[in-house]
Amino acid sequence: MGKNITLTVIKADVGGFVGHSSVHPELLETARGILTGSPLLIDFCVTHVGDDINLIMTHETGKDNGEIHQLAWDTFASCTRIAKKLKLYGAGQDLLSDAFSGNIKGLGPGVAELEFEERGSEPVIVFMADKTEPGAWNLPLYKMFADPFNTIGLVIDPKMHKGFLFEVCDLIENKKVTFSCPEELYDMLVFIGAPGRYVIKSVFQKETKEIVAASSTQKLNLMAGRYVGKDDPVLLVRCQSGFPAVGEVLEPFANPHLVSGWMRGSHTGPLMPVPVVNSNPTRFDGPPRVVALGFQLCEGRLLGPQDFFADPSYDLARQKANEIANFIRSMGPFEPHRLHLDEMEYTTLPEVSNRLKDRFEKMRLS
Ligand code: F6R
Ligand code: MG
Ligand code: MG
């Protein structure tokens, strides 16, 4: 067995430029400078989606490694110092603790990691989204790994024909369950169709048990004992040779689906596929964006990125997303554009209810 490679992506919003729309170039340069000096990494790519900095890193120290998480924490802490100096918006907002304590999970930044033995050729895609939540990956992951209308390989590639295993987390009760598909598709859909609570964490090939995909599932809004915001998610997917092809992995995004997030983390809107350069959400702080960066791994080195959604074949998806955005915006503060009361990141309900409580009268039931 060769040595395992770990692909780790850690992301945080440590200050927006301007407002919550993008990242100041000095922050990206600061992050690059710090990672360049690290002996822990084989390679890295520092990039962003909207106001989130994404550290894409490869190394041989395995998943959940304290030193790698420390490196990311220190990088975000240094970026926060610059963000504060420049008075960027919400400087340090995702660093919920003053001190790092060994593992970055639960402290604010989002993490997705894949540990595997690098194949003869190893194409991977890093998806990064802004103004939405980890459950936004449920529908595309279902299409990639379980829907033959999306992934023809499930039907005609003997290496994929047996299907995949899906690990699903219940973010409210902190439990997980694994579904074997296609046999348990209908059971699984009962849960993953409710992406605010049930989130696909990982996907494995059924026969070999090899890990194929991993998402970030930290739900920031339930952390630190209070509702502090939706956690803009990342997703890592290995492609080809018995896993879905690059084009099968990208295909779900050709048809934008509705996700939770957008303005004040309290609205439903379409997920628009865009290249990095167009990933800055502006209209009503949105609509939510997704970027897909492709890399070929070579002994852990990251060859790339290919900015996949720069391709004009996603133009229609963007147009459709704009049309859906226009339509749903016309509903203003009404559900389902505004999220259900339990899901909103901002609410004035307790204060207004309290102020008006004496004006509410009991109603008779007849
Ligand atoms: C959504 C988001 C923005 C802000 C909005 C208000 O995830 O980041 O839509 O919620 O711009 O921000 P504040 O309350 O900071 O003025
Ligand atoms: Mg922000
Ligand atoms: Mg963000």
Image (cartoon, rainbow, N blue to C red):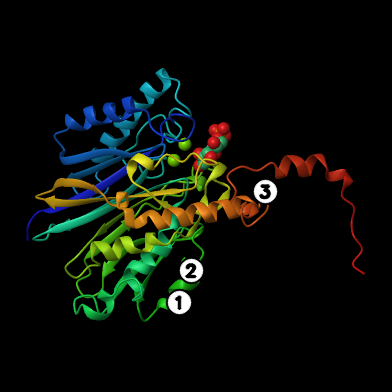
Sequence-first disc among 2 and 3: 2
Residue nearest the observer in this picture, 167 or 269: 269
Image coordinates of residue 347 in percent, x first then y, are 65, 43
**Circle 3: element type:** loop
Q: Amino acid at mark 2?
A: Phe
Image coordinates of residue 93 in percent, x first then y, are 46, 33
**CB contact under 8 Å: marks 2 and 1:** yes
Q: How far apart are labels 3 and 1 at the CA level?
A: 34 Å
Picture quarter with the C terminus: bottom right
Image coordinates of residue 99 in percent, x first then y, are 38, 30
Q: Amino acid at mark 1?
A: Asp
Residue nearest the observer in this picture, 295 or 320: 320
Foreground mark, 3 or 1, reads: 3
Q: Which mark is residue 187?
A: 1
**Circle 2: element type:** helix
- Answer with the quarter of the image where residue 154 lies: bottom left
Residue drawn at x 27%, y 27% is 29
The answer to whether residue 298 is above or below residue 29 is: below
- Answer with the quarter of the image where residue 100 lies: top left
Residue drawn at x 18%, y 31% is 36
Q: Which mark is residue 333?
A: 3
Left or right? Give the position of 325 relative to 18: right
Q: Is residue 228 visible?
A: no
Q: Residues within 10 Å of mark 3 (few under 14, many from 20)?
A: few
Q: Which residue is mark 2?
A: 191
- Answer with the quarter of the image where residue 169 lies: bottom left
Q: Amino acid at mark 3?
A: Pro
Residue nearest the observer in this picture, 3 or 256: 256
Picture quarter with the N terminus: bottom left
